[in-house]
Amino acid sequence: MKKISTLGPAGTFSELAALKYIEKIGRKAEISFYPTITKAFKAIGQECDLGVVPIENSLDGHVQVTLDLLTKTDLQIIYEFVIPVQFAFIGNVLDIREVKSIYAQFKTQGQCYEFLEKLANPRIITTESNSESFTQVQKGISGEAAIIPKHMLDYDSRFSLTINNITDSTENETRFIVLAKDAVAYDEKKDYKTSLVIMNALNKPGILSQILTSFSEKSINLSSIISRPTKKALGKYFFFIDIDGHFPKEIKIKQAIDEISQDNTIKILGSYSEI
């Protein structure tokens, strides 16, 4: 039986994502929970066979810690999929104006920004997971509240104040990736995406334009490009790029990446399909 690492504890969207992956593959697997995304990464290939982690949210953008970890490990993205995400508000108060502090996971805050902006300046306490937020407010301390996944309302309904949906958009979604030490076999019947990172782009005028031109001249579609600081010096960035197609099976993609690699260091993060 395979073991899957993900952000815990139980009840998080990460657990829902891991369960969805298990359902899709149609095989039994055991989920192992870790307190941070970093520890979930480190478990892959050690204590666990695979990992399921969030990489992008439709409201709050990419998960920065996931991007940073992808540059440091030799893991491969082997699948991706999307799950809907909605949040609820719970509190140990009778009136929302009595809220003094709110527990909220670091990415959750950006997905409920409009709701938080309307409150009378309560203290926001950042947590590592939505389950941690839930656990904190379950202690019953007066004046405390939390933002939690909407489905977690089924676990406990004893709170004085409950608001069923506070998400900024009803169409909010999070993209998850499945990580493993080795890539999976290529299937010509599937549509693929390739994720890569330019690790040390040559520091000269127009270099990013040249990189993009290498793809556009070969009619390769870019679905995403973002930059992240290398954390080594100001003005130094990694460029994360998602393109449609498979490397190295599709010749034009291989040609473009070989061309870019002449002046830049490229790390292929994986060529993968949706599950």
Image (cartoon, rainbow, N blue to C red):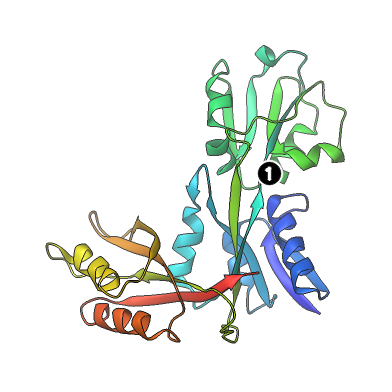
Q: Using the image as rendered, state which of residue 216 and residue 14 is in the foreground.
A: 216
Identity of the residue furthest to the left in this view: 205
In this picture, residue 37 sits left or right of residue 205: right
Q: Going 46% across and 61% down the picture, which residue do you hit?
A: 67
Relative placement, left or right, of 19 versus 174 is right
Instruction: Please name whichever residue, 218 or 95, is drawn nearer the observer in this view of the structure.
Output: 218
x, y percent for residue 250: 42, 84
- Which image quarter is the C terminus in? bottom right
Between residues 27 and 92, which one lies in front from this camera angle? 27
Residue 227 relative to residue 110: left or right = left
Above or below, 149 against 260 in this view is above
Task: Using the image, determine if residue 107 lies above or below residue 96.
Answer: below
When the figure is inspected, residue 52 is found, relative to residue 147, above or below; the finding is below
Whether residue 72 is situated above or below residue 20 in the rendered picture: below
* Residue assigned mark 1: 130
Residue that appears at 38% across and 66% down: 221
Q: Residues within 10 Å of mark 1 (few under 14, many from 20)?
A: many
Quadrant for residue 258, please give it.
bottom left
Residue 89, quarter of the rendered image: top right
Residue 228 x, y percent position in the rendering: 36, 56
> Tag 1, which secondary structure?
helix
Quarter in which the N terminus is drawn: bottom right
Type of amino acid at the residue the image marks with label 1:
Asn
